[in-house]
Amino acid sequence: MEDATRRLLQYVVVPLWVGALHQATAVWDVAYADGQRRVTPTEQHIHGLLEQVPAMATAFLVVLHWDQAKALVGIGDEQPEWRPECKRHPLPASYRQGFLATVTALIALPYGEELWRCVRAARRADLSGGA
């Protein structure tokens, strides 16, 4: 297989398929939850936002590293760099701590809260005889 074709498959087609699988999983998740408990419009909108995260992350990486993105598909003057590199100017510890706190507050806690609601709903269903 030609190198540019392989890179195109690896870095464009495969992420598109993974994104489609992610989207299908999100639709299945809401459809399943809707049959088990009330799914509010707010929850549906939050799921819609979360469905966009992989596409946004990919787009941000492409924009921030445009020369490398072009190199991955065989165009441009650069060669693709495959090894990870440390930042020349590392982010301050306070920034990293703030980022982790934000991820915790806006991602981990909402997922944990949803898990808690699901466990609570399952317990209620068990106590009421499965109805």
Image (spheres, helix red, strand yellow):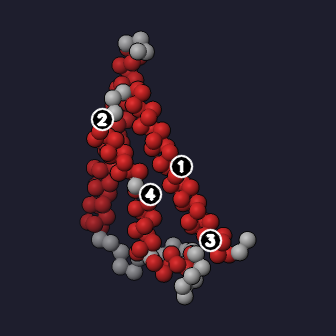
Circle 1 residue: 21
Disc nearer the start of the sequence (2/3): 3
**How many residues crowd around disc 4 within 10 Å: few (fewer than 14), some, or many (20 or more)?**
some
Q: Position of residue 81 (x, y in %)?
A: 55, 78
Position of residue 1 in the picture relative to residue 7 (left or right): right
Using the numbered discs, state the Cα–Cα distance from disc 1 to disc 4 in whole angstroms: 11 Å
Circle 2: residue type = Thr
**How many residues crowd around disc 2 within 10 Å: few (fewer than 14), some, or many (20 or more)?**
few
Disc nearer the start of the sequence (3/1): 3
Circle 1: residue type = Leu
Marks 1,4: beta carbons within 8 A:
no
Circle 3 residue: 7
Point 50% across, 45% down: residue:
24
Mark 2, secondary structure of its residue: loop
**How many residues crowd around disc 3 within 10 Å: few (fewer than 14), some, or many (20 or more)?**
some
Q: Position of residue 39 (x, y in %)?
A: 34, 33
**Image depth: mark 2 or mark 3 in front:** 2
Position of residue 5 in the picture relative to residue 60 (left or right): right
Mark 1, secondary structure of its residue: helix
Residue positioned most to the top:
129
Point 41% across, 51% down: residue:
51
Q: Is residue 26 above or below residue 129?
A: below
Circle 4: residue type = Pro
Circle 2 residue: 40
- Please identify the quadrant where the C terminus is shown: top left
Task: Say the numbered circle drawn on residue 54.
Answer: 4
Residue 86 visible to the viewer:
no
Q: Is residue 38 above or below residue 62?
A: above
